[in-house]
Structures are given as structure tokens and as C-alpha cells.
Image (tube, rainbow, N blue to C red):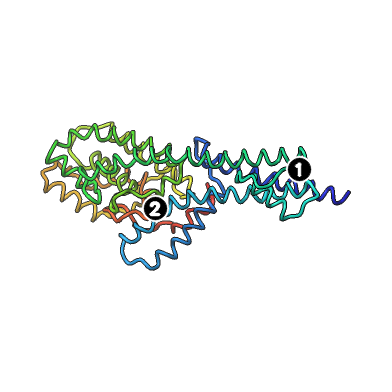
Amino acid sequence: MEILLVRIGIFIVGLWLVIVAMASAVRSLVLPRSAPDAISRFVFISLRRIFALRLRQTTSFLEIDQVMAFYAPISLLALLPVWLIIALLGYTLMFWSLGEISWYQALRSSGSSLLTLGFTAPDGWHRTLLEFSASTLGLILVALLIAYLPTMYAAFSRRENNVTLLEVRAGDPPWAVTMLERYQRIHGLDKLGDQWQAWETWFAEIEESHTSLPALVFFRSPQPNHSWVTSAGAVLDAAALYLSSLELPTEPRAALCIRAGYLALRRIADFFAIRYNNNPHYPADPITITRTEFEDALNQLAASDALVKTDRDQAWLDFAGWRVNYDLVLVNLARLTMAPAAPWTGSRGKAVAPMSLFSQPK
């Protein structure tokens, strides 16, 4: 009787491991919403630590970019063998609990079924059903990952289209002041409305894709100096400068772009447990841009014949009031993704160390 209870307990543990592996795959590949997963988190953290050891030997950002370009793809592909190993252990326990076979035979039956190798023959209807379920699960896991990759790369391509186009308008690396200067010289700042609308849509898309497909956060741009984080920062700062510091008619689309931007960045930050104030106010909540940097930016804009507001004290308060909504999450996402250096984005002020961002979801 005791042996029977032990075998039932081991079967339940094995079944639980299989369910854990399948649930992790569903949360990571199927569920169309942000759902932190312990197994995915473990895989990404473990590989991040391995990559951190390799980065100790790098001497330039170009080398860092070349190394980290492999981080997200390798981490993503590593999920499949991890899920299979967990399921393999689970089925090994279940096969053994059915009795009359050794641990080695249980492992062989589990591996043969899960990997659809077919070198063991089931004996009895209960083992036959178990092997059928293992074979089905193995095929499902592989099929899910194969189907997942085109979806991810389609979202990546849409994201990078705007990032690449921004180089034409905001320089390389992108900067808000460069963007405003170029529009002032070529089109006129009153023609920026279409850009605010286009980037509002872009922010909505990355909020959906980078929370339901969180590995996308770490996929690096084809060009070393490009980054979705620094591009987001440049556009948000350009909109904040436009609204706060330039003598131009009120542009609601710029305000909507900022709101869409900081909401998207916050949703992504939530997934990685980046803490921030939901309702920040300047100066109670400081920003990482200094008044001196702000003044230098306005002087540069004035030199390009842009109509800068004469009341710079009020302009600074207005700019800081916009920037405070996305400042901390922007800086920490730049650190988390090891984004290239860019004006007003990157390692500025106090920011959370990248590894601690993986600690626990909020």
C-alpha cells in the first residue's frame, strides 16, 4: 500500500512538471498579453549572466553590440530545450510510477515519445496513452516555437522601419534637437503633425508587441547606433520641446504622442519590474536632464532660427513636466537593453542595475 501511494505521488509530481512546461510555453508563445513566466525569466537571467562574463572582455560599444546581438535569439531558442527537459523529467516520473520498469527504461520511454524517436514500444494501454500524450506535447512545443518566430520578426520589422526612418530626421544617434532643427530648415516645424501621429501609432504597436512578445525588447537593431529605446526618447523629447519651448500653435497630436509614449514605456517597464511613480510631478520628482542641458538645447534651436519662447523659466518647468512622465523608465530601459549612447538617453543619474530589473514582476 505504501509503495502504491509513493507511485501515485510520483505520478502526480510528473504530471505537474509536464503541466508547468506546457503552461510556460502557452504564456510565452500563445497568450496575447503580458504574462511574466518563471521559466522564461530563469532562462533569460541565466544567459544574461553568461553574456555578462563575455562582455568583461569587450573594450568598445561596437563589440558589446556584436555580442549582445546574439543574446535575445539564443535565449529564445534555449526555451525549447528547457521546456523539453522539464517535460522529459515529468514523463520519466510518470512512466516509472506505472511500475515494472527501471528508471533508465522510464527515461528511454519518455525521450523516445517526447522527441518522437520511436525506438521503444509501449507495453499496455496505460503506457500507450502516456506515450501518445508525450509525442503530442513534443510536436506542439516545436510547432509553437516555429509559428512564433515569424510573428516576432514581423513585429521587429515594423518596429525597425520607423527607427531607421528616424535617422533621416533626427540624426545618428537620434536627438530631439536635431529633429526639430531639420524640420525647421526643410519643412517648417508646423509640418510635424504627421510625425506625432505616426509615432503615436508606433508606440501603441510596441506596447502590444513588446509585452506579449517580451523577447523583442532585447532584439537589437541592424545598425549598431540604432535602438528602439533611443528613438523613442528622441521623439518624446522633440514633442516635449515643441510643446514647452517653441512659439507655435498648440498641437494636440504632440501631446497625444507623449501620452502614448510614456504609457507604452511604462507597460514594458512593468513586465521587467522597473519601479516608477504612476503620477509624477516636477520638481518633487526630478528628471535626469539638467537645466544647463536644456538651455544649451534652446540656444541651438534659436541659432537655427526656430522661434524659442522668451520665458525660459516657464519653458523649463513645462518641459520638465512632460519629461518626468517617461524619464525614469526611458533611462532604465536604455540600461536594460544596453542601448547605444544618445543625447538625453542612456546611463543618466540614478538607474536600476540591469540584472535587478529581472527580479520579480510588480
Would residue 141 be found to the left or right of residue 314 on screen? right
Residue 236 coordinates in the image, percent (x, y): 30, 42
Would residue 131 be found to the left or right of residue 239 on screen? right
Residue at 29% in and 40% down: 162
Q: Nearer the viewer, residue 204 or 8?
A: 8
Earlier in the chain: of badge 1 and badge 2, it is: 1
Would residue 28 be found to the left or right of residue 253 on screen? right
Is there a contact, CB below 8 Å, between mark 1 and mark 2?
A: no
Residue at 63% in and 41% down: 135
Disc 1 to disc 2, how far (Cα)?
51 Å
Badge 2 crowding class, 10 Å Cα cut-off, few under 14, some 14 to 19, many 20 or more, is: some
Residue 118 coordinates in the image, percent (x, y): 64, 44
Residue at 69% in and 52% down: 107
Q: Visible in this render: residue 263?
A: no
Residue 227 coordinates in the image, percent (x, y): 32, 49
Which residue type does callout 1 highlight? Asp
> Which label belongs to residue 342?
none
Badge 1 crowding class, 10 Å Cα cut-off, few under 14, some 14 to 19, many 20 or more, is: few
Name the secondary structure under disc 1.
loop
> Disc 1 or disc 2, which is closer to the eye?
1
Which residue type does callout 2 highlight? Thr
Above or below — where is 234 with respect to 350?
A: above
Q: Residue furthest right?
A: 1
Q: Which residue is mark 1?
A: 123
> Which label belongs to residue 337?
2
Residue at 51% in and 58% down: 46
Q: Visible in this render: residue 278?
A: yes
Name the secondary structure under disc 2.
loop
